[in-house]
Amino acid sequence: MIAPFFAEWYIDLDAGLRPIAGGEATTIAAIAAVAAVAGTSVAAYGSYQQGQAQAAAGKYNERVAANQAQAAREAAALEADRAHDKNRRLLASQRARIGASGITTEGSPLLVMMDSAEQAALDEATIRYRGSLGAAAATSEGVLQGFYGRQARRAGTIGAGASLLTGVSRAGASYASGQRTTTAPVTDYGGEGGSR
């Protein structure tokens, strides 16, 4: 009594699945392939956009570093100009004191004034050099940030391409797999005269 019930259930199940086993399996495989391609496209676009965003950040950082380099140069020039004015006033004050004391500018007073002028020039050169080092460091950082941005753009584009290729390959494999799994409907249900 149980055997006929299961045989009937199997016949009903097979009758319900028969359209899927025929033509609808191809449709389901095609839908799955399209969904895979759509998902892959979204992933590829995300990878591309991430690369673009990182490239934009790199370009921005490059501009910031260029501005910092320019600011370092300008600050050094301003500081060197202030030092020059201070040293010029100091040398003028030394000459005035030497002149007011009645000492000639020969010998030791001349050596003192020459040493002061030399030290002033060295101070100004040191200030300008520190400024150029700061500008060079900022410029190098800007070049590096620009490089990182360009590399991120390339990586995003390559990642998007790789995602597309992988996704299309998987979708094709999924579609082909769906095509292979379609089978002919079962016609022998193990009833009289048949075997399973």
Image (cartoon, rainbow, N blue to C red):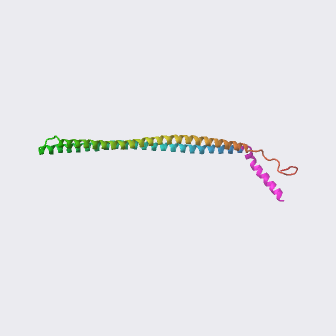
* View extreme (front): residue: 107
Place of residue 7 in the rendered image (x, y in percent of width and height, measured from the top left)? 81, 54
| Front residue (pair 122, 48) | 122
* View extreme (right): residue: 193
| Front residue (pair 59, 17) | 59
Residue in view at x 59 percent, y 44 percent: 40
Left or right: 114 as drawn, with respect to 61: left
Place of residue 22 in the rendered image (x, y in percent of width and height, measured from the top left)? 74, 44
Magenta segment boundaries in residue numbering: 1-23
Residue in view at x 79 percent, y 53 percent: 10
Left or right: 108 as drawn, with respect to 22: left
| Front residue (pair 158, 194) | 158
**Quarter of the image that includes the N terminus:** bottom right
Place of residue 11 in the rendered image (x, y in percent of width and height, measured from the top left)? 79, 51
Picture quadrant of residue 103: top left
Picture quadrant of residue 96: top left
Place of residue 85 in the rendered image (x, y in percent of width and height, measured from the top left)? 23, 43
Residue in view at x 64 percent, y 41 percent: 169
Q: Main secondary structure of the magenta part?
A: helix
Picture quadrant of residue 60: top left
Number of labelled discs?
A: 0
Q: Is residue 146 magenta?
A: no
Q: Is residue 10 magenta?
A: yes
